[in-house]
Image: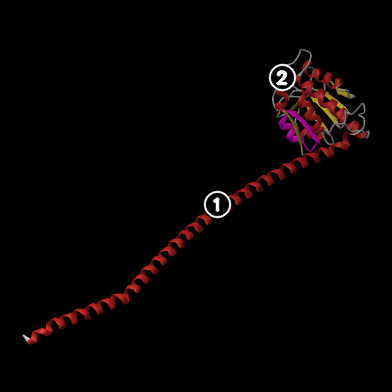
Amino acid sequence: MPENIYIPAVVTIVIYLASLYITRRFTVHAPIVEERLYVDGIVRIIRAEYEEEIDKLKEDAKKAKKLFMDEIENLRLSSEQTQADMQRTIDFLVRELSVAKIVPLIEGSMTREDVLVVVGTEDTALKMDLMAVRRSGVRLSRLQPATKTSLETMLNRRRKNGTPIKYIHISAHAGPDGIELEDGLADPEWLADQMQGVTVLLIAGCRGENLGDWLAGIARYVITMSEPVRNTTTPGMSDIGIFSEVFWRGIYNNRPVPVAFDEAIQMSPAWISEIAELHFV
């Protein structure tokens, strides 16, 4: 019995020591655990903010790239537009230069021999063209009906006299193979020989566009009709006659050839404007 009186005391001491150990252990590590949890939370917050900032930068970079590409495309379109504008300006200046080249040749009053009207055959419709040229106010010479011999003789005589014919109006049936005169067909090669030095050659006949291409540059300006000529106006007048009258009046009034051509187009029936062609090089 005396030995057992110490047992409760021993137990009490053991429990106390165990409690002290446990208390000290958890009291020491609790702040560390809490600190780790706090640090982990801060890291997660920083990482989330960082990732959000990266996403924002990526979106900004994407928008900036789109703006940059749009600006590049705008510059490309602007450059193409500028080139187109420059080309139109160049074309305009080239046309103006072509007009300027002819202006000195048509200045001053026209003389009696300035316009030669060539009537190909004894055809009433062709003779109406002669009357139209008369109404324009120019002074003229005529060959009616014209042959290749009479035309060549007149042109050579005027060249020999130092007064070459600069303006010729041919009213005749025409086509790709040439112009029909009283003594036969005047083919492109023969016409090219005769038209040297001519300023304006107006062929008031059907399907003359091939002749215009052939003779342009030999005669400075060549005017042709690309389709058969027909009349839709009042009897006694002709549609091609309206064109011829307005055109030669413009030349008489010292208009540059392209300007006189445009004025004649505007004053003629609509279908004439669709088939009349001005050839020059």
Q: Which residues are magenta?
A: 207-225
Q: Quadrant of the C terminus?
A: top right
Quadrant of residue 169 within the rendered picture: top right
Q: Position of residue 136 (x, y in %)?
A: 86, 22
Number of marks drawn: 2
Q: Position of residue 134 (x, y in %)?
A: 86, 20
Q: Is residue 66 left or right of residue 151?
A: left
Amino acid at pointer 2: Arg
Q: Earlier in the sequence, mark 2 or mark 1?
A: 1
Callout 1: SS:
helix
Relative to the observer, which residue lies in front, 232 or 173?
Answer: 232
Q: Quadrant of the N terminus?
A: bottom left
Amino acid at pointer 1: Lys
Q: Residue at x 47, y 58 (%)?
A: 55
Q: Is residue 78 visible?
A: yes
Mark seen at residue 230 = 2
The correct choice, above or below, for 155 with respect to 8 in the image is: above
Outermost residue, left side:
1
The correct choice, above or below, for 14 with respect to 83 in the image is: below
Relative to the observer, which residue lies in front, 123 or 134?
Answer: 134
Neighbour tally class for label 1: few under 14, some 14-19, many 20 plus, Cα within 10 Å: few
Residue 224 magenta-highlighted = yes
Q: Position of residue 280 (x, y in %)?
A: 77, 36
Q: Residue at x 21, y 79 (%)?
A: 16
Relative to the observer, which residue lies in front, 31 or 272?
Answer: 31
Outermost residue, right side:
161
